[in-house]
């Protein structure tokens, strides 16, 4: 994977992107606020999500009776195919993972050193 400088939630960070098709991960993103490396794996899974209900025109169907505690539109439970996600929160483990999978790990290490100041 290749380490590239990026931005996440308005903060400078780094990402890791695959450089060949055999890579087991789709993307890795380091969140500077939570100090977590989010890893998106190549394995797909089906997960249930509540999504807005749509009419025949593709518009969101609004509820007839609105309450303060709920959303003003109808929702339905659907299965959505998503990628498996993993999270690393320990700095030593982030460093080890980056050294194992990045072709240019020093770019990430330099970023992590700047972040500690």
Image (spheres, grey):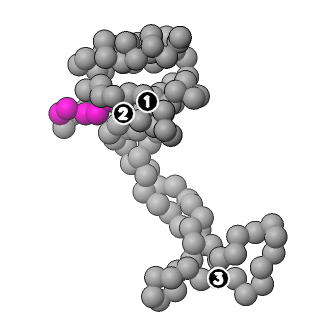
> Contact, CB < 8 Å: mark 1 with mark 2?
yes
Q: CA distance from mark 3 to mark 1?
A: 39 Å
Location of mark 1 (residue)? 12
- Residue 10, image x and y in percent? 49, 38
Q: Which residues are magenta?
A: 16-20
Considering only vertical position in the picture, is 50 above or below 46? Answer: below
- Residue 32, image x and y in percent? 52, 27
Nearest the eye: 46 or 101: 101
Please give the name of the residue rendered at 45% of the width and 13% of the height, measured from the top-left corner. 114
Nearest the eye: 92 or 30: 30
Nearest the eye: 86 or 17: 17
Please give the name of the residue rendered at 56% of the width and 60% of the height, measured from the top-left corner. 49
Left or right of residue 97: residue 73: right
Work out whether residue 93 can be spotted.
no
Task: Say if the magenta span includes residue 18.
Answer: yes
> Contact, CB < 8 Å: mark 2 with mark 3?
no
């Amino acid at each position: 994977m290749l380490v590239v400088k990026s931005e996440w939630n308005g903060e400078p960070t780094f990402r890791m992107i695959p450089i060949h098709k055999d890579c087991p991960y789709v993307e890795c993103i380091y969140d500077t606020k939570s100090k977590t490396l989010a890893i998106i794996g190549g394995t797909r899974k089906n997960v249930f999500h509540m999504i807005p209900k749509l009419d025949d025109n593709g518009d969101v169907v609004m509820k007839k009776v609105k309450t303060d505690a709920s959303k003003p539109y109808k929702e339905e439970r659907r299965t959505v195919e998503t990628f498996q996600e993993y999270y690393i929160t320990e700095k030593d483990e982030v460093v080890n993972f980056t050294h194992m999978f990045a072709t240019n790990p020093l770019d990430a290490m330099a970023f992590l050193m700047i972040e500690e100041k």
